Structure formats: C-alpha cells, structure tokens
Image (cartoon, coloured by chain):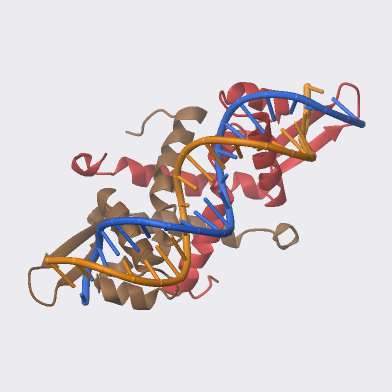
Chain colours: A red, B brown, C orange, D blue
Amino acid sequence: MRKAYTAVTAAEDVEKALHLLEGRWKLLILFHLFGGQVQRYSDLERLIPGISQKMLAQQLRQLEADGLVSRKVYPQTPPKVEYRLTEWGQALCPALDALLYWAEQRPEADAG
Amino acid sequence: MRKAYTAVTAAEDVEKALHLLEGRWKLLILFHLFGGQVQRYSDLERLIPGISQKMLAQQLRQLEADGLVSRKVYPQTPPKVEYRLTEWGQALCPALDALLYWAEQRPEADAG
DNA sequence: CTGGATCCAATCAGATACTG
DNA sequence: CAGTATCTGATTGGATCCAG
C-alpha cells in the first residue's frame, strides 16, 4: 500500500530522495558500483578523473551514511577498503532508468 | 532504440536531468503544477510558504528555460501570468514516482 | 593506501527595497 | 500583480598538506 501523497508531502519525499543523490560526484560513484561492481578507493579515484581525495571520501561517507553504499575494511598493511552498493542502493537503478528515459524524450527545440 | 550507455555517459545524463530539478523549491513548484494544474505567480507564492519572490521568480525562469514549464502572460492591468507544465514536464511524473517508490523501500535501520 | 584537516573561491539562498 | 536589484550570510566544492 502506497502512502497517500499530497503535492507537498510528495515534493518533500522526492526532495529527500534527490538530496541523497546531490553532489557533483555521487552519481558517478554510483554508476561505477551498479551491477554488483566492487571498487577500492583507489579504483574510484582512477575511474573518476578530476575528483579530489576530499570529495571522494566525503561523498562516499555520505552515501554510506545514507545506506546506499557499504564499506568493507580489510585490516592489513597497506590498508584496503572496498565499496559496493547495498541492496537498496541497487534498487535505485530502475528509478534512474526512468529518469534517463525521460531525459531522452526532451524536445530538441527546447534543449539547451 | 535506447542509447548505449556507459557508466560515465549514464551518470552524466542523469546528472543533467537531476540538475534540472535541483534547487530548494523546484520540486515544490512542479508538484503544484502536475496533473494539468495552472497557477498564477501569486498562487504559487501562497502555495509555497517561505519562498521569497526572488527565489520563486528565479526557479520559475529556470524551469521555463529548461523546457519543463511554460509561461503565459496576459497583457492587461493588473498583469496576469499563468504557469503550467509543458508536455515534457508532465512526462517527468512517472520518473518521480519511481523515485518515490524507491524511497519507500528504504530499510528502517539505515534511515536517518 | 586511505583518508582527515585546513584554507579559499564560487555558488546558493534569504531579506529587503523598489518598479511598470 | 508580477516581478527586479542589491546586499549579505550560508553552503558547497576544490587545492593542498598531513597522518595512521
């Protein structure tokens, strides 16, 4: 059973959801983890040219706190940390696909 | 036929799409226009408590420039301006619904 | 290797006052 | 009624250096 949405509550809930994806790098990170991919910190640094260490660490920690990404630390020297999507994080895929589909429908005349 | 997406191009396209929805008030505005609703500037001002005139005008103009909202001016005194969604703007609804559905699936334990 | 801490620039958002 | 202009504070993102 879905919640009963008003314009306001729906907007708030979508806003909360979008807030989890905001930040210039989060989507890039997520797309590099979709499909069960597992990446190390240094992998993501390599896969996302231009990202600073601060931003990578910060966005990863937010994604982790929000429950989209899980972090696995191997207590060894040198340190090794793996990132992967949680089940819920994977479940974001269809929603992003719907957004992608919408973006494709954009009339050329208005695009800019 | 869908585009062939890589992690990077998909992320970029979704990012562009999300960028159209960013801003603290845009979703509120959109939800007050969904379903073919037509609102005047002052209607939106009333429907969205706390928004300043500057922000309302600014976000409306961005939504218009991005092709989600259309603006109709009645050249009369006092002035009258109506806002409604474009066809493409209306088409955003299913995508936001998918996002809402995803948000509902969030595990309680991780929510915060 | 995996980050944390700090400083700085750019952007965003709010309050207020003013205009056709 | 439907905005615009200006000033100001908050938030975000980036560069660099430091540490376990």
Residue shown at 73%/57% (left/top)?
A: B110
| Residue A33 in the figure: left or right of residue B92 | right
| Residue C20 in the figure: left or right of residue A56 | left
Which of C13/B71 is in front?
C13
Q: Residue furthest left?
A: B76
Which of B93/A2 is in front?
B93
Say if B16 sits above or below D16 in the image.
below
Residue shown at 41%/69% (left/top)?
A: B51
Q: Quadrant of residue A23?
A: top right
Q: How many marks?
A: 0
Say if A87 sits above or below B50 in the image.
above
Measured as percent of width and height from the top left, residue B44 is found at 32, 72
| Residue B19 in the figure: left or right of residue B107 | left
Residue shown at 59%/31% (left/top)?
A: A32
Measured as percent of width and height from the top left, residue A96 is found at 48, 45
Measured as percent of width and height from the top left, residue A53 is found at 68, 30
Residue shown at 20%/69% (left/top)?
A: B82
Say if A35 sits above or below B47 in the image.
above
Quadrant location of the N terminus of chain B in the rendered image: top left
Measured as percent of width and height from the top left, residue A20 is found at 58, 51
Examine the rendering and report whether any part of residue B49 can be seen: yes
